Amino acid sequence: MQVITQAKPMKINFTDQQIVEGLKDDDDFKRLRLFQHQFFHKFKGYIYKIAIQRCISFHDSQEMATDITQQTFINAFRKIKDFDLSREPDNSKHEYLIKAWLGTIANNCFNKEYAKRKDHVYLDDLKSRPEEGEYDMFESLYGGEPIEVPNMFRSKLREAMKGLTEIQKHVIEVYAGEGCIHDDKKKLSKEAMKILCKTHDTSSDNIRQIKKRALDKIKKYCFQTSK
Amino acid sequence: MIEQALKTSGFLFPETVEEVKEFERIYGTTDVILPAELHEPTFLYSKSGSGNSSKVVKFPSANFAMAAREGKSDLPKEIQQKIIKDIKDVERKVKKKKK
């Protein structure tokens, strides 16, 4: 018996590094588009999944999360030429590095969307991370030694965050994003403070007060001992 | 610990390799089902990178049904509740319009 098999479209599996390198070569639009699709389909779920969690307190959470996801990829493709994955020889780390890099972009996108929704759009002021000096940027994707967080603490923190006002929550997230909660001596960058002041139409002194009150609330909730 | 927990519990996008690993350890790597606007990256070629808001009318019941998840990859309860609430809100609006 003769079996006739139908030809299936060829599916090409590129490595993460091949995709990133392919995205940098914009001479051939068709080829570039192929790599853009590959990259987008591989990482869109990851970004959207976190975006929807971040936007949960907004009435239009789905729309906001979609906008953040789309804008993250638009910005990533704009900046891809500065992202040098070949500096990490271990291929198994590439996916994590890309996700971490997309995370830095997505956090900026969140702040922009947040400001837009507060009707305070200052797009020129919304650069909260340096875009120059990508060498340092790449190094920072590795981070320091991880701290183990017990699940119980995570649940308590989630509850504590629910008890904060919208402003308190945003302020705490921005401070945490810049590593200014763990390290008391570290000050929030001027850019981030400017964004907070403009978004919430208040002074830097007030922002610091809001951060202190919010952090006290969190600590009280998370670290209180049951009698 | 507060900072680390915020960075790996979905309050912020993880920004380092270790944070990404920790986030995926807790929430798993299974994706949620995406809204129609994210099925294909057509926005790359139509929005010119201007970041316009999505204008397509959406039905969250179609967009938000969550994918089957492996044990530990569940989303937090409040997110699931919010999703259900969104679905009900839209369905109510649609019913009102029909009337």
Image: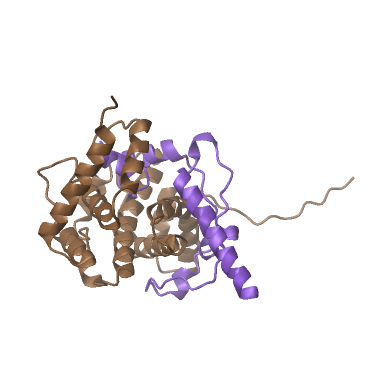
Q: Residue furthest front?
A: A227
Image location of residue A170, percent across then percent down: 27, 55
Q: Residue furthest top?
A: A227
Most extreme residue toward the right, as rendered?
Answer: A1
Q: Nearer the viewer, residue B23 or A21?
A: B23
Above or below: residue A73 compared with residue B55: above
Q: Is residue B59 left or right of residue A20?
A: right
Which shade of the palette goes to chain B?
Answer: purple
Q: Position of residue B65 (x, y in %)?
A: 58, 53
Compare residues A100 and A110 and report the one nearer the observer: A110
Where's the N terminus of chain B, which quadrant?
Answer: top left
Tally the marks.
0
Residue A84 lies left or right of residue A49; in this view the side is: left
Which colour denotes chain A? brown
Look at the picture and state if B31 lies above or below A31: above
Quarter of the figure that contains the C terminus of chain B: bottom right
Which quadrant would residue A20 be assigned to in this image? bottom left
Tell me the colour scheme of the image.
by chain
Q: Is residue A26 above or below residue B2?
A: below
Q: Is residue B62 left or right of residue A47?
A: right
Q: Is residue A10 left or right of residue A227?
A: right
Position above or below: B48 against A1: below
What residue is rendered at 20% in x and 61% in y?
A: A196
Q: Find residue B71 and report its horizontal and vertical position in percent.
A: 53, 35
Q: Residue at x 13, y 58 (%)?
A: A206
Q: Residue A32: give x, y in percent of width and height.
A: 45, 64
**Residue drawn at point x = 14 percent, y = 53 percent:** A209
Q: Is residue B3 visible?
A: yes
**Residue A146 seen by the camera:** no
